[in-house]
Image (tube, grey):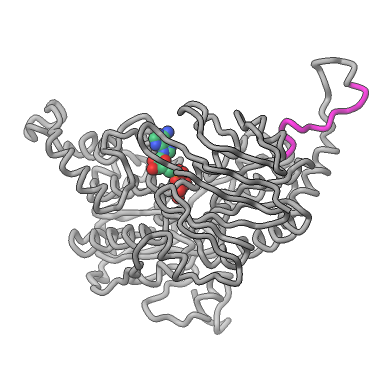
Amino acid sequence: MEILRVENLSKDFNGIMALNNINFNLKEGEIHGIIGSNGSGKSTLMNILFGSKHIRQTGGYEGNIFIYNKKVEIKNTYDAIKLGIGMVHQELALLGELDISSNIKINRENIIDSTKILGNFAIVDVDKNNDDARVSLSKVGIDIDSRIKVKDISSNLKQFIEIAREIDNTSLKILILDEPTSSLNTRETKMLLSHLKEIAKSGISVIFISHRLEEVTQICHRVTVLRDGEIIGQYEKEDYDINKLALDMIGKEVVQTLKKKNKSTSNPILSFNNIEVSYRNNIYTDISLDINEGEVLGITGLAGHGQELFGYGLMGLYHMDGDVRYKGEKLNIKDSNAMIKKGIYLLPNERKEMGLLLNHSIWENLVFESYDKQNKFMKYPRLKHLSPLNYKAIYRYSNNMIEELNIKVRDIEQEIRELSGGNQQKVCIGRAITINPEILFVGEPTRGIDIYSKEIILDMLLKLNEEKNTTIIISSGEVSELKRVCDRIAVMYENKVFKIFHKDFDSEEFSLAISGRRLNEDEEA
Ligand SMILES: Nc1ncnc2c1ncn2[C@@H]1O[C@H](COP(=O)(O)OP(=O)(O)OP(=O)(O)O)[C@@H](O)[C@H]1O
């Protein structure tokens, strides 16, 4: 039975046709995949269905939406929720200071009966809330104390909590998930997908947006492909062909990037010697790693095992203590501001942490740190920061960058907040390349990025390494990408380097290392 139908849906953002005449339907209990490159209109379609403020503030939409064949107006999120629609966005939205159960029960709190007579004052039934939260969490496969504050849990778990919050709504009919697995590891992804199947079997329809075609074809009953705001194809499960889906999405074949040249040396450029790092109320000691000059080093491991701790510690996002040497000299790691000046730069995992200037233009976001911290792009370089900016050079550079990184924009004056999530991320990568550091730490560089642009980003990072001899450290859960572009891969386990693998390593040994085990248990770390 059809639960949702959209007819001739269009959305124009000031001349940018984000959606053009979309016709789409969703059946009861169906998992429907929506795929498309960055900026193809996936989030816009979902934001319309969820009554997002963003759509209203930019002039609404054209076309019709039907729920159970009845035409509906979705003017705001409240309308959407009343119609049984729930959504988990790419950027998670939980309240860190509240515990898990308060986040799940937000606006649906259980109230102790006797307090209802107090009018506006009511006492929340905390025990009942915790019970409800436990039930919803179990539906997504999570068993955790729901009284823990959200700020103290990993971003992976937050994804499950947001889905549990939507499931907790007993009138939920349509669950929209915008890239729910992008921050999950293989095990968590498997768990979420199997629970989503159960959720769909219970009659809830799921709209599943993802850049991971293997997952989409595994879990979805049907897939709709968007390109430049239009539906390019729609496929039933029996007709899935990953190559054809990729071709529909991108419009051309995707060639995988591979590291060919090896410019790395065995001279450590940066050494962490038995350091101590503390984050999320835990202290980890005795952590060591040598990073070699000119190498591309991958750092991977299960979430929460510290793959990001070296970069985060150096930049002050985690507290780090101990002996860190850069080109043989001891670094003052208390002064994270000095790191950029020394040539060390970090692009963190989360877009929110990347310091994007959302109300500023693309060109400003690409170059502001270079002119602010490095006095680059000055009209009169000798005057340093007293000089006006060289706009001609900035515009030329920025236009070149958006082309090289395949960033979908109207022009370089467009504000960052108007870009799709994936395109914002590409701007961050562009900023790091502009800084041209000696050492670049980059976390999850291809998260939320479409299959074609992923290769562009990896290619740009390799170019930086090959042409500028930048030492690059990529922390990522995407092991297949790391294998293609890294000279070595360090596996982290319990916040220590468990083992370092060189090219052409044994896959079995690698998989064991991820879970803290060795082929030969007597082997030394
Ligand atoms: N407020 C806005 N003003 C102008 N253009 C906008 C605005 N919001 C979105 N767009 C544009 O609409 C288009 C579709 O964006 P959308 O976020 O729907 O893409 P997406 O397919 O979800 O991409 P991604 O995979 O990167 O998340 C993009 O070109 C984007 O720049």
- Asked whether 243 or 239 is in front, the reply is 239
Would residue 250 be found to the left or right of residue 259 on screen?
right
Would residue 265 be found to the left or right of residue 11 on screen?
left
Question: Residue 311: horizontal and vertical position, in percent?
Answer: 40, 52
The quarter of the image that holds ligand 1 is: top left
Image quarter of residue 444: bottom left
- Asked whether 141 or 469 is in front, the reply is 141
- Give the residue displayed 20% in from the left and 39% down from the top: 374
Task: Assess whether residue 286 is covered by the magenta stretch.
Answer: no
Say if residue 142 shows up in the picture.
Answer: no
What kind of secondary structure does the magenta stretch mostly adopt? loop
Question: Residue 259: horizontal and vertical position, in percent?
Answer: 29, 71
Would residue 175 be found to the left or right of residue 308 on screen?
right
Say if residue 496 shows up in the picture.
Answer: yes
Range of residues picked out in magenta: 104-115
- Asked whether 501 or 101 is in front, the reply is 101
Question: Residue 114: horizontal and vertical position, in percent?
Answer: 93, 23
- Give the residue displayed 77% in from the left and 44% down from the top: 133
The vertical placement of 265 against 345, above or below, is below
Question: Residue 357: horizontal and vertical position, in percent?
Answer: 36, 33
Task: Assess whether residue 108 is covered by the magenta stretch.
Answer: yes
The vertical placement of 10 against 209, above or below, is above
